[in-house]
Image (cartoon, grey):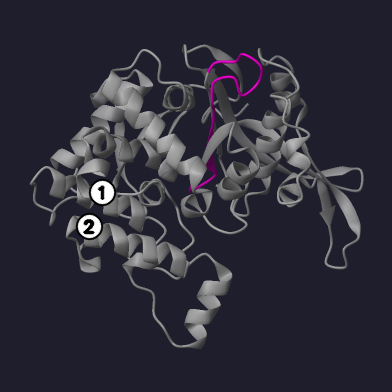
Amino acid sequence: MNQDFGYAPLVELTRGAIVECVHYGAFAVVDSQGKLLCSAGDPDLRTFPRSSMKPFQALPFVESGGVEFFGLSEEELAIMCASHAGTDAHVAVLRGIHKKAGLQESDLQCGVHYPSDRVTSDAMRLRGELPTPYRHNCSGKHSGMLAAARLRGLPIENYLELEHPVQQSIRAAMAEMSAMQAEALIPGIDGCSAPVYALSLRAFAYAVARLCDPVGLSAERQAACRKVTDAMRSYPLMVAGPGKLDTVLMQVLGDKLVSKGGAEGYQMIGLLPDADKGTPGIGIAMKFSDGDPDRRATYSLVTAILQVFGFSRQLENEAYRGFADSVVRNWRGLTAGEKRLSALATEALAHCRYRGDV
């Protein structure tokens, strides 16, 4: 393990008989009682969950009755938790939120970029259409923050400032869900300009487990957690987009889990209670030190962890098969090597408490 940063070798790529590439990272698997079930690297490594935090950023709005006040649908709530692909379908849902909450696209301060959905992006470029804030993958989250400000009669011009009441309520909710003090959450600025907070993988995995299994929380928080996870599982295309990991996982295993990726090699997965024969809610948080730009290490580790919890059969689904593929191929399609877990990661998962076959 890299003692300076808390990362350990987790995923290897071979070429012939040689290990050619190693992805360093860390992960923690924690249940809703706060028990660390297994880990590799330093589970207390502090890092930013980035967009994996989005379901938690929606919680205060939901808990305050915003969904009912504005008459929002589950689909509209799902996109508030999303890193969406910027398709026309996503834009249509965002427009619906803005109409109900009395917002304008120009109120969004997330910035602009072309959609990550290649079909949509190519079509826009062909017709000379420039992206607008609605196409930004974080515009759903920002719409939720703006709606939260409207709900409370707060100014929207400065809704991204760290001291804005909307951001302070998000910080408090994240602290409560992770059993941390709000002051212990280290603030940063996300790629979309919203505040984001660093916390340990263990603490964030615990928060994810409680999001999926909120027993013991206040009645209002329990209801909000269930609304968020129900919306994500009911509308997985809103959470990411066609062919994206989060969407495909929830399409294949939506009765068992929620999934939300983040930038720079972060990924969270939450298993619902009884996902694996009597288990409580379980949170999984992982981070790769190199940012895992093509997500290949994330796909390998996600697949391996879900197999530990008994989902091997479901992961054979055609829609997921590409994510589970362990073969390294060259440009002619010839097998050049394999993608596999390191011995350290394999050993860590072998000692995970809950095992079984669904």
Q: Which is nearer the eye, 90 or 332?
A: 90
* Kind of residue at disc 2: Lys
Q: Does the CB distance between marks 2 and 1 fall below 8 Å? A: yes
Q: Name the residue under label 1.
A: 71
Q: Quadrant of residue 256?
A: top right
**Residues rendered magenta in the picture:** 261-280
- From this viewpoint, is residue 48 visible? no
- Describe residue 250's horizontal placement relative to residue 164 as left or right: right
Q: Which residue is drawn at 36% across and 52% down?
A: 76
Residue 55 image point, x, y percent: 39, 39
Q: Is the magenta stretch mostly helix, strand or loop?
A: loop
User: Which is nearer the N-term, disc 2 or disc 1?
Assistant: 1
- From this viewpoint, is residue 162 visible? yes
Q: Name the residue under label 2.
A: 100
* Kind of residue at disc 1: Gly
- Describe residue 210's horizontal placement relative to residue 337 as left or right: left
Marking on residue 312: none
The CA distance from mark 2 to mark 1 is 7 Å
Residue 107 image point, x, y percent: 20, 63
